[in-house]
Amino acid sequence: MRTVGTVSRGVRCPVVKEGDDLVKIVTEAITACGYEEGLTFHEKDVVAVTEAVVARCQGNYATVDDIAADCRAKFGTDSIAITFPIMSRNRIAICLKGIARAFKKVYILMSYPSDEVGNHLFDDELLDEKGVNPYSDVLDEKKYRELFGYAKHPFTGVDYVEYYTELFKAEGCEPEFIFANDVRAILPYSKNVLCCDIHTREKSKRRLLNAGAEKVLLLSDILNAPVNGIGYNESYGLLGSNKSTEEKVKLFPRDCRAFVDELQKSLEKATGVKLQCMIYGDGAFKDPVGKIWELADPVVSPAYTDGLEGTPNELKLKYLADNDYADLKGEELSEAIKKSIIKKDADLKGNMASEGTTPRRLTDLIGSLCDLTSGSGDKGTPIVLIQGYFDNYAD
């Protein structure tokens, strides 16, 4: 039996800049890795590339002024409300700067005790202590401060209400904060709303329109079309963007499916094997201590080749060992389990022997593995090579 199962390798390459041939760079990095490590490539190996370098090669950037201009053009007013911005200096602050530059006054609806990806404004234990019902209570900033004070984020040391206040005022915009978890709580303040939430955005829009909002746009509606050569993303707009400089934002990459298909062809030519390819961004997992759900991108993977479609279809080995083959040991047990794997149904949904296996899309699982492998700091590994992920005990 081969003793090694899944192996995930972060692969280094030259620092990628706008206009570089990324397909060539990734192909050369993978073949160099194979030579250096003495690897044999297999049909179901996965080569994944972080969305950041794809967008950088494309030059998919926009400025704060670009954001402001698009917001002004699409709302045509000097005052709006924004709802549920996450708490992030990297992810949303640069977008808020553009929004602030576009308007004279902005009403800001913050969810509490945390944003949708788990960043906490304050310790949620205080809700019971202060007698606050997060499902129904609407607080203004004065009441919020009276109840919860000036708590700072445990990782960043930032009071985000204070931070966003200063950000808006620096752009000559007056911010007014409201704290509630029902998006409709913003409507007494403004009927023109920009929904800044990520995964709940369509629900928020529907609720607002049904409750009498006049104009509701999403972050995905801002910079979703090319204007005078600036960056854009037709599917996600500002969603998935990251701060580049104090005046520039890097958007989520475009034309992703074309990239992974071209990369697959290039790698097959170089290795003789049809590898699977994907672009990945944030993983989808939760930190049990910090309570942060990693996924601030709209999706884990904006594009992948066909072989990565679907969900795992696996048997739970410990279930087989403890139930079906409880009376077997050693080689006899191993052989029985291998036969079960070989003969397993193409769709194990509802089968008790698959209970406890991970019911998530393959691209979400593999993308999360890639995100953990490459990290977000100075590892310098924007490419990930995964081998053995699709192996099983019977192979």
Image (cartoon, helix red, strand yellow):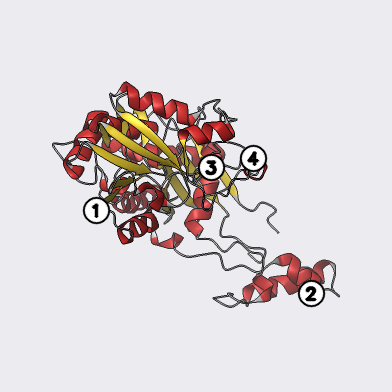
Cα separation between marks 3 and 2? 43 Å
Mark 3 or mark 4: name the one nearer the start of the chain: 3
Q: Which mark, by number, is residue 323?
A: 2
Between circles 3 and 2, the one closer to the viewer is: 3
The three-letter amino acid code for the residue at tag 4 is: Leu
Spatial CA distance of label 1 from label 4 is 36 Å
User: What is the C-alpha distance between the residues marked 3 and 1?
Assistant: 28 Å
The one of 140 and 376 positioned closer to us in this rendering: 140
Tell me which numbered mark, 3 or 1, is placed earlier along the sequence. 3
Q: Name the residue under label 4.
A: 126
Quadrant that contains the C terminus:
bottom right
Q: Name the residue under label 3.
A: 114
Q: From the viewer's perspective, is the residue at label 3 or at label 1 nearer?
A: 1
Residue 119, percent across and down? 53, 39
- Residue at x 53% of width, y 31% of height: 145
Check contact, mark 1 vs mark 4: CB within 8 A: no
For the N terminus, the quadrant is bottom right
